[in-house]
Image (cartoon, grey):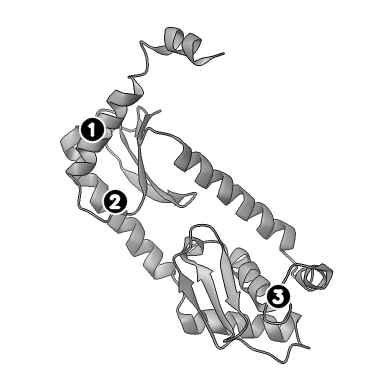
Amino acid sequence: MDNFEQEILFGDLLPPVAQISKRRAKRDSLLPEGLPEFRVVRSRRRRSSISAYRKGGVIQISIPARMSKQDEIAAIPEMIAMVLRREAKERKTDDQLMQIALELLSKLLPEFEIKPASINWRNMSERWGSCTTVDRTIRISDRLIGAPTYVLNYIIFHELIHLKVPGHDQDFKNYLHRFDDLLRAEAFLEGFEIGCQIGNSGVMSAVNI
């Protein structure tokens, strides 16, 4: 079905994209600057409750379909702040990240004599982690804050291997397959990426369900 046919069939149900964008711009102009990426979902199944959680890297805020625009604008920063507070509690310290790394080295890479000099969170939107072999520093994407333990451990383990093996050759793969939850972690990350693409692909920031 081409765009012309869709417009004929659904034109009376969906407002024009330009109109949606204009409403979104007006709403966003009334919000505080510097908010993380978010998406508002209006649900007919909700009567008064509001919820918020991070999905695919985007904070999704679910509100009742009949909520006024004024109440929506007031709720958005409050719900974003709630998600950030919750994530802050789940955020492991640099020392805790280092402890995980040392335990993984001891258990799965006992022959490695090299150890990371530091490991910390970093704002990275396109990579899950990175490693600089020169100074032995490891950085983990803050998108993984709140992710399952096995996923975080997998990324840390991946970067630990890079301390000794720069590329992704067969030696690297042989080391990587020592991680028991390899397939499970990769499946989670693949689903996470798909969620990010879906969340970022649409023009609409307010969706009715």
Give the structural element (helix, strand or loop) at label 2: helix
Q: Which x, y percent locates residue 117?
A: 56, 88
174 relative position to 73: left or right: right
Give the quadrant of the N terminus: top right
- How many other residues sit within 10 Å of disc 3, few (<14), some (14-19) or many (≥20)? few
Q: What residue type is labelled 2?
A: Met
Number of the label disc, if any, that sits on residue 166: 3
Above-or-below relation of 28 to 132: above
Distance CA(mark 2)–CA(mark 1): 15 Å
Q: Which x, y percent locates residue 103?
A: 65, 84
Number of the label disc, if any, that sits on residue 67: 1
Give the structural element (helix, strand or loop) at label 1: loop
Above-or-below relation of 67 to 83: above
Q: Residue at x 37, y 62 (%)?
A: 86
Front of the two marks 2 and 3: 3
Mark 2 lies on residue: 79
